[in-house]
Image (cartoon, grey):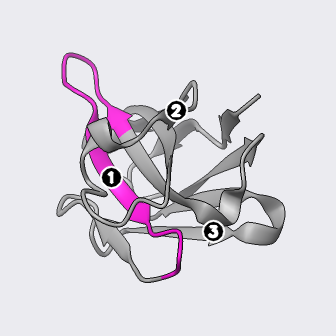
Amino acid sequence: QVQLVESGGGLVQAGEPLKLACVASGLTFNFYTMGWFRRAPGKEREFVAGIIWNGEGTYYADSVKGRFTISRDNAENTVFLQMNSLKPEDTAVYYCAARRYLLGGVQRRTEYDVWGQGTQVTVSS
């Protein structure tokens, strides 16, 4: 059974850091491009960051560039999202997503076929 499980969400104050983790099971993790998306109240799910399965690169939404870092540990089947200098507008449910061999369209949520349940991140001002 393919599964993605996020963890690390919580309540922090503006300016503080937070690190999310997503553990994958039931798939060959090395072959999967991994993405982080988020959905704020009243808004659509949006792309945050992505990391290509073959190590060719990382991608970020403009709103988080320079503050967030995506990384992966293939030995642990885990993808991370280090979030620094958090802002109240970063408040959302954060989702991990996966797609085998994905190279293009990393920012499009429709490209991903495996999703986690999400973890809540709340940033207070």
What type is the residue that disc 3 sits on? Arg
Q: In this view, does 66 lie above or below 95?
A: below
47 and 68: which is toward the camera: 47
Residue 40 is situated, as x and y percent measured from the top left of the image, at 29, 27
Residues in magenta, as a range = 38-55
Q: Which residue lies furthest to the right in this view?
A: 75
Circle 2 sits in a helix, a strand or a loop, which is it? strand
> Mark 1 and mark 2: span between their CA atoms?
14 Å
Is residue 116 visible in the rendered image? The answer is yes
Choose the circle earlier in sequence order: 1 or 2. Answer: 1
Left or right placement of residue 88 versus residue 44 in this view: right
Circle 1 sits in a helix, a strand or a loop, which is it? strand
Which class describes the residues within 10 Å of circle 3: few (<14), some (14-19), or many (20+)? Answer: many
26 and 122: which is toward the camera: 26
| Residue at 24% across, 57% down | 105
> Do labels 3 and 2 touch, CB within 8 Å?
no
What type is the residue that disc 1 sits on? Val
For marks 1 and 2, give the one nearer the viewer: 2
The residue pinned by badge 2 equals 115
What type is the residue that disc 2 sits on? Trp
| Residue at 37% across, 59% down | 49
> Do labels 1 and 2 touch, CB within 8 Å?
no
Check the picture and name the quadrant holding the N terminus.
top right
> Do labels 3 and 1 touch, CB within 8 Å?
no
Choose the circle earlier in sequence order: 3 or 2. Answer: 3
> Mark 3 and mark 1: span between their CA atoms?
15 Å
| Residue at 40% across, 61% down | 50
The residue pinned by badge 3 equals 72
36 and 19: which is toward the camera: 36
Q: In this view, does 57 lie above or below 20?
A: below
Choose the circle earlier in sequence order: 3 or 1. Answer: 1
The residue pinned by badge 1 equals 48
